[in-house]
Amino acid sequence: VDASQQYQLSFEVLFTGIVTFGYWGSIIQLTASNRDGLQNGDRIPGIWQHMDGTTKLYVRTGTSFHGDLGCTTSELPLNQWISVFVTVSNGNLDVTLSNNIKGCSTALPGTLFPSTKNVGVFIGDTFGVRGYAPAKMKIRNVFYLTRH
């Protein structure tokens, strides 16, 4: 994928279960470094099932200020397809969900990772990190749109 500083990532997710309490459930991560870390470019964005034993989405991206900025949504229902829209634009991260489920948003201080080519896309990957597990989910209709 060719990534830009302003983008929209959209997909549909269906949670089939909950990951073990204390583990982050890996859903999808776009990374310029092909690793999961806290440097700018490691998460553009990264999305996990929350470690608190729920189906909340933990959505993170990085800037020159910090490599791990983001927000957490409300819980998603089990066994129901939900549309997820992650938009980074004008210094903000906004997450919108279908079915009147509350998303989240936050300001992104600092400079976003520059537009770059050949960004890695990983679904359910733990990157060998302790405390990560593949999310118990299905994912479909993944789209990445650059915005100018």
Image (cartoon, rainbow, N blue to C red):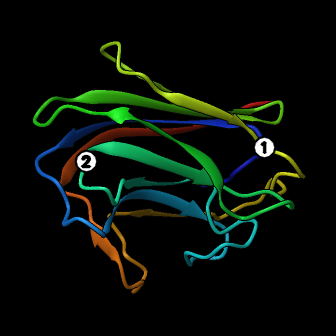
Residue 148 as seen in the image, left or right of residue 74:
right
Q: Nearer the viewer, residue 114 or 90?
A: 90
Where is 144 relative to 66, above or below?
A: above
On the image, the x and y values in percent for residue 113 come to 80, 57
Examine the image and state in which quarter residue 93 appears. Answer: top right
Where is 40 relative to 136, above or below?
A: below
Residue 64 as seen in the image, left or right of residue 4:
right
> Which quadrant of the figure contains the C terminus?
top right
Please name the residue that numbered disc 2 is placed on. 54
C-alpha separation, residue under disc 2 versus residue under disc 1: 25 Å
Q: Residues within 10 Å of mark 1 (few under 14, many from 20)?
A: many
Q: How many labels sit on residues?
A: 2
Label 2 sits on what residue type?
Answer: Thr
Q: Secondary structure at mark 1?
A: loop
Q: Secondary structure at mark 2?
A: loop
Please name the residue that numbered disc 1 is placed on. 108
Label 1 sits on what residue type?
Answer: Leu
Where is 99 relative to 139, above or below?
A: above
Residue 52 as seen in the image, left or right of residue 104:
left
Would residue 146 be visible to someone looking at this image? no
Examine the image and state in which quarter residue 36 appears. Answer: bottom right
Would residue 108 be visible to someone looking at this image? yes
Residue at point 66% right, 61% down?
Answer: 68
